Structures are given as C-alpha cells and as structure tokens.
Image (spheres, rainbow, N blue to C red):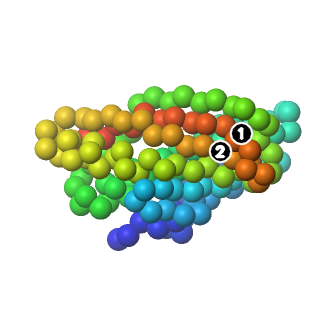
Amino acid sequence: MTLTASKLNGFLMFKLPSAYICGVRTKSLNPDSCVVTVRHRWINQNPFKSMFWAVQGMAAELSTGALVMLRIAESKKKISMLVLSNEASFTKKATGKITFTCQDGHLIQDAIDKTVATGDGQTFWMKAIGVNQDGVEVSTFKFQWTVRVKA
C-alpha cells in the first residue's frame, strides 16, 4: 500500500483523533517533503486567542513523521520509529491557517540503511517550519527521530 496525504488524514481520524478534531491535515507528501496545515479555531486556541503550541506541535510532528513512515514503507522492512527529543521556537502569534513544511526526507534513508545493516538504532534530526497565510514564520520545530529494525 502506498502512503498518500489522503490516507494519512484517514489514519489521523482513527488513530490520532485529537489531531484530526483540531484540524491537522496533510496536504502533500513525497519522499523528500511533506506539507501539513492547521487552521486557528476555537477548539485549538489558547487563552491569548492564538493557536495552542501543542496543536502546532502535532502538525509539525506529522510533517516530519509522515516522511519517516513513507521511507519505512518504501524499505519493506519492519522498522520502529519514535521521537526521542524535540525543540521548538515561536516567533509570532499563530492565527489563521498555519502551514508546516518539512523538506528533510533525504535524511531518513541513511538511517534506515544503517539500522538494517547493523541492527542498531539510528537517530537523526528533522525540522518543520510553520508559516501563516502571509508567509511569515510563526514557529519552528525540530524532532530527533530514532529508527530501529524490529526484532
């Protein structure tokens, strides 16, 4: 089965309903990049009438994690994935439609190849940048992923 943006959105509805209810949606996915959007609404706002940081984090993590899932599926190997660490910075109030883009798909293949060859877990960092409708950066998230061949 090929992983697509629409299949990821269905996955969200059943496996990550809080993200789905908050409006997180995958718009595009290819081996090198993923675009995920979320619109500021009443259900995902903080007391300051902007998007809650955790909702931004869900969208940002999906933009990186979807790329990891896609590369694992392409490898046809049983490989586990997990976020080991993350960092975030917020530069502007997140209101309106926020688009998170990760263009780090190229970083994953080397880690998958190494874990398949050695059986040892491999880690790598991926970055997702969130911009508002005007193209202004509102937040940047970095996720340290770990992959390992399943025993």
User: Residue 131 or 50: which is nearer the viewer?
Assistant: 131
Residue 40 lies left or right of residue 4; in this view the side is right
Q: Which quadrant holds the C terminus?
A: top left
- Gap in Å between the C-alphas at discs 1 and 2? 6 Å
Circle number at residue 73: none
Question: Under tag 1, what secondary structure?
Answer: strand
Q: Which quadrant holds the N terminus?
A: bottom left
Question: Under tag 2, what secondary structure?
Answer: strand
Task: Say above or below: 92 vs 96.
Answer: above
In the current view of this chain or complex, which residue is farthest to the front?
135
Identify which residue is drawn at 44% across, 47% down.
Answer: 104
Q: Mark 1 sits on what residue?
A: 138
Q: As shown in the figure, which amino acid type bears the numbered disc 1? A: Val
Q: Quarter-wise, where is residue 128 in the image?
A: top right
Identify which residue is drawn at 54% across, 64% down.
Answer: 28
Q: As shown in the figure, which amino acid type bears the numbered disc 2? A: Gly
Q: Is residue 147 visible?
A: yes
Circle number at residue 130: 2
Crowding at dot 2, Cα within 10 Å, few <14 / some 14-19 / many 20+, comes out as many
Residue 22 lies left or right of residue 87; in this view the side is right
Q: Is residue 14 visible?
A: no
Tag 1 and tag 2, C-beta contact below 8 Å = yes
Considering only order in the chain, which callout, 2 or 1, is on the residue closer to the N terminus?
2
Identify which residue is drawn at 77% across, 54% down.
Answer: 133
The spot of residue 143 in percent (x, y) is 48, 36
